[in-house]
Image (cartoon, rainbow, N blue to C red):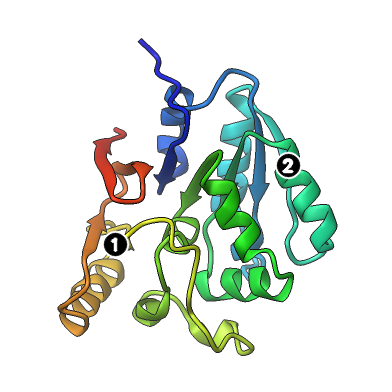
Amino acid sequence: MIKYPKRTLVIILLSSNNQILKQYLQPNAAVGFIPTASELDDDRWYMEKDHTAITNMGFNVIDIEISSESKTEITDKLARVDAVFVAGGNTFYLLQKLKEKDVLSNLADFAHHKTYIGASAGSCIACPSIDYLDKLDDKNQAPLLVQYNALNLVNFYILPHYNSKDRYTNGANQIEATYPNRKFIKLPDNQAIIVNEKGSYEIVATA
């Protein structure tokens, strides 16, 4: 039986696993798609794959371009959608753009009332801070970013793509050793984290 919880924060890591969205979103739901983290990549295939997958599931996808749209345009779109999907890329760059447009708090407020979905960078930015990610992402791509406080939707820190590639696995292990007092979740690509409240979550298989 499909369940539609009143409020769920969903964190997804691979487009191949996006079918799980059908368990948490109503058919024909409006999904705001934020591709910003991938903007610096010449080949944005991973973002485009997510966009296509969500569209093909029958959801009404509304693009939200943080870099080029005004704060008013962004917040108006957030008010019109049932969920947001924040795609992958560089987490530092994504946070820089959200802060430049002064919409970080708006996105956090959205997640407390509707459904937030993050892929890779979009999942890491749900954490209290992204200061730990410099071994996985290039923070030089966000030269204007000086404060790393993020959405603070969860009370743990995500290490994405664990066991998918050596650089992710080795980087995650180094990060965990660097911050021994933080709660990390090493999340492989065949799992997702479903959060119903900030302190209540479950890790589910997606493949």
Disc 2 element: helix
Task: Say the numbered circle drawn on residue 79.
Answer: 2
> In the picture, residue 79 is in which quadrant?
top right
Q: Nearer the viewer, residue 207 or 200?
A: 200
Residue 196 lies, in percent from the top left, at 37, 39
Q: At label 2, which amino acid type do we have?
A: Ala
Please tell me whether mark 1 sits on a helix, a strand or a loop.
loop
Q: Is residue 56 above or below residue 149?
A: above
Residue 114, compared with residue 187, is above or below; it is: above
Residue at the (29%, 50%) spot, across then down: 199
Vertical placement of residue 21 versus 70, above or below: above
Quadrant of the rendering where the N terminus is positioned: top left
- 9 or 191: nearer the viewer: 9
Q: Amino acid at mark 1?
A: Phe
Identify the residue at horizontal 44%, vertical 63% (top origin): 152
Residue carrying label 1:
156
State which quadrant residue 180 falls in.
bottom left
Kindly give the residue lying farthest to the top in the view shown.
Answer: 1
- Distance of label 2 from label 1 (alpha carbons): 27 Å
On screen, residue 154 versus residue 67, left or right, reads: left
Q: Is residue 119 left or right of residue 99?
A: left
At horizontal 60% and vertical 48% (from top left) the residue drawn is 110
- Position of 170 with respect to 95 (left or right) is left
**Residue 4, horizontal then vertical, whole percent:** 45, 21
The crowd level at tag 2 (other Cα within 10 Å; few <14, some 14-19, many 20+) is few
